[in-house]
Image (cartoon, grey):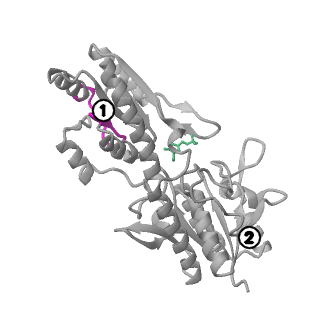
Amino acid sequence: MSTHRIVILTGRGDAPGLNAVIRAVVKYAVGQLHWQVVGIEDAFNGLLSEPRRLHDLTPRSCQGLLHRGGTILGTTNRGNPFSYPDGEGGTVDRSADLAAAIEDEGLEGLITIGGDGTQEIAWKLSQSHGIPVIGIPKTIDNDLPSTDFTFGFWSAVEVATEALDRLHTTAEAHDRVMLLEVMGRTAGWIALYAGVAGGADCIAIPEIHYDVERFCEKIRARRRRGRQFTLIVVAEGARPQEGDQEPTHEPHGKGTVMAGGTAQTLARYLTERLEVETRVTVLGHLQRGGGPIPFDRVLATRFGVHAVNLVKAGRWGEMVRLHNDEVTSVPLESATGMPRLVEDTHGLIRAARAVGIEFGQP
Ligand code: F6P
């Protein structure tokens, strides 16, 4: 006998592990507790489109999902119910339509798997329309406050580290300065972890505006020691300190801006100042594609199960999180607001500096 009918969605940029969360929620809630779980296609859009795009999820329909990248529900960057595209280039508030659709479908509440943007929408829905929501934090950027790690992050770090390992050998063979641009518009977590794991000599992150001269000096010092090549990891949101030209931003679809070009900019600065041959690799969406590594599969499973436990306990309005290796929860509101940035005092920054990695600032 079904005692709950809940709905699940995946919002904004995908991250390895989304399907593993869906699977965990469905296996537990439907397979063990005999509830109903409905999936919405393309974040909130599936509830607002005509006809609605909803699917009853069952353990059978979720078979083989643990290791699969992407999301079986689909996702989108466009479809905020509070500023929904009106089809004529403008936006309209459709949050009341969403609330009505939830009631009409007999849905008790929402489980939103997403980053800060999605959790903020979820929180606003709960505040303005009384919709019960539970959040599950996701983003490869790892920049959500209140959780030690989001799932997807370590899978992205794995891809970036492998790229560095590969760049390492060819950099050494050709005596080149190799720059790897990784994702991270506002937070440099991927650059920091992958840079340390992949033996980078320099790391440029958005939080530390770099002095190009410090990177030049690192390259010179390596050469004096007979190391003719250098590996540099650059987060897509990295910036030079004041006075140097900002990297360009490319418009990326309507209303959104894509960071990037930062590695190319830094490469140009270096060649203007040193006799070096540089090559730039932009890793882009390779970091988001593909299946999750074991850590993210495990974290996704724990998050999914904990979210169902919160529903069971009637603890709506919370977001699951990982803290000191325990999965617990915090008020959903704490996931909104400012992103969690890399602080200069972070232990890994100190460890990285201790092994000689240059960040462009002392
Ligand atoms: O927010 C996650 C993220 O991967 C960022 O690091 C990156 O800048 C952005 O998504 C890219 O988004 P899109 O897929 O819309 O190009």
Mark 1, secondary structure of its residue = loop
Q: Pinpoint residue 286: horizontal percent, then vertical percent.
A: 52, 39
Q: Does 213 lie within the magenta span?
A: yes
What is the three-letter code of the residue carrying label 2? Ile
Say which residue label 2 marks.
102
> Left or right: 1 with respect to 189?
right
Q: Nearer the viewer, residue 171 or 331?
A: 171
Q: Along the polypeptide, which appears first: circle 2 or circle 1?
A: 2
- Residue lying furthest top in this view? 275
Q: Nearer the viewer, residue 336 or 271?
A: 271
Q: Nearer the viewer, residue 155 or 324?
A: 155
296 up-or-down from 245: above or below: below
Q: Quadrant of the N terminus?
A: bottom right
Q: Quadrant of the C terminus?
A: top left
Q: Pinpoint residue 162: horizontal percent, then vertical percent.
A: 41, 39
Assess disc 1: are there few (<14), some (14-19) or many (≥20) residues with their C-alpha within 10 Å of its C-alpha: some
The part of the image, by quadrant, that contains residue 106 is bottom right
> Left or right: 303 with respect to 43?
left
The image shows a total of numbered marks equal to 2
- Residue at 47 percent of width and 28 percent of height: 248
- Residue lying furthest right in this view? 51
Q: Pinpoint residue 69: horizontal percent, then vertical percent.
A: 59, 51
310 up-or-down from 267: above or below: below
Say which residue label 1 marks.
241
Q: Is mark 1 within 8 Å of ligand 1?
A: no
